[in-house]
Image (spheres, helix red, strand yellow):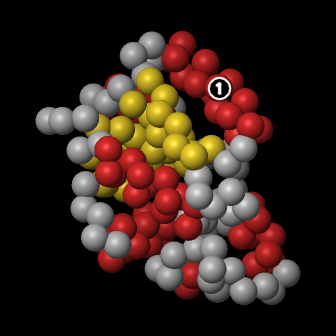
């Protein structure tokens, strides 16, 4: 089957920073599962199913085809085991991201000891879903920070 990986996140919304990480992961892995995590305790700003459609449209338009977007309400470490992958992709913007991710990785390794983390440095260090939501909330144009297929979801 080749090397597969999962790239989990809330992707609420999916940004150009996320797109950058997906491109890098799809260049290295044969298949990348983009896992939209849904936490029943947190309210999403944008519907997960619509975001999945926008991500799929974006990647297809970019000529990326070795991916699948799925929505997961459970633990991503268990999802990785079910999908038969031992690699989890994470994007890093700075050392704070690294420290946070290492804490999460420690917990995930307790759940799925075979899970290995692969970190990619983001080329878009200032872009985050939180920043996009905040700027959008103040009526600012965020079209430079999200793919074109995501933009209609913000309106």
Left or right of 59 on screen, residue 7 = right
Q: Left or right of 125: which side holds 96?
A: right
The relative height of residue 98 versus residue 29 in the rendered view (above or below) is: above
Residue 98 visible within the image: yes
Residue 41 x %, y %: 69, 44
- Say which residue appears at 31% left-offset and 30% top-offset: 85
Can you say which quadrant of the picture contains the C terminus? bottom right
Residue wearing tag 1: 102
Q: Quadrant of residue 17?
A: bottom right
Asked if residue 70 can be seen in this view, the reply is no
Say if 105 sits above or below 147 in the image.
Answer: above
* Drawn side of residue 115 relative to residue 125, left or right: left
Q: Residue at x 74, y 37 (%)?
A: 95
Q: Position of residue 141 (x, y in %)?
A: 72, 86
Q: Quadrant of the N terminus?
A: top left
Circle 1 SS class: helix
**What percent of the width, then of the height, locates residue 105?**
58, 25
Mark 1 Cα shell of 10 Å, populated few (<14), some (14-19), many (≥20): few
Above or below, comparing residue 62 to residue 90 in the picture: below
């Amino acid at each position: 089957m080749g090397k597969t990986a999962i790239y989990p996140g809330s992707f609420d919304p999916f940004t150009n920073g996320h797109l950058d990480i997906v491109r890098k992961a799809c260049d290295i892995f044969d298949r990348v599962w983009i896992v939209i995590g849904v936490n029943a305790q947190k309210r999403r700003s944008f519907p997960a199913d619509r975001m999945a459609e926008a991500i799929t449209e974006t990647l297809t338009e970019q000529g990326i085809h070795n991916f699948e977007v799925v929505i997961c309400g459970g633990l991503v470490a268990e999802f990785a085991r079910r999908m038969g992958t031992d690699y989890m992709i994470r994007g890093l913007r700075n050392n704070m991201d690294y420290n946070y991710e290492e804490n999460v990785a420690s917990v995930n390794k307790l759940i799925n000891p075979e899970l290995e983390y692969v970190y990619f440095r983001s080329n878009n260090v200032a872009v985050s879903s939180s920043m996009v939501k905040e700027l959008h909330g103040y009526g600012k144009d965020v079209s430079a920070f999200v793919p074109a297929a995501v933009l209609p979801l913000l309106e």
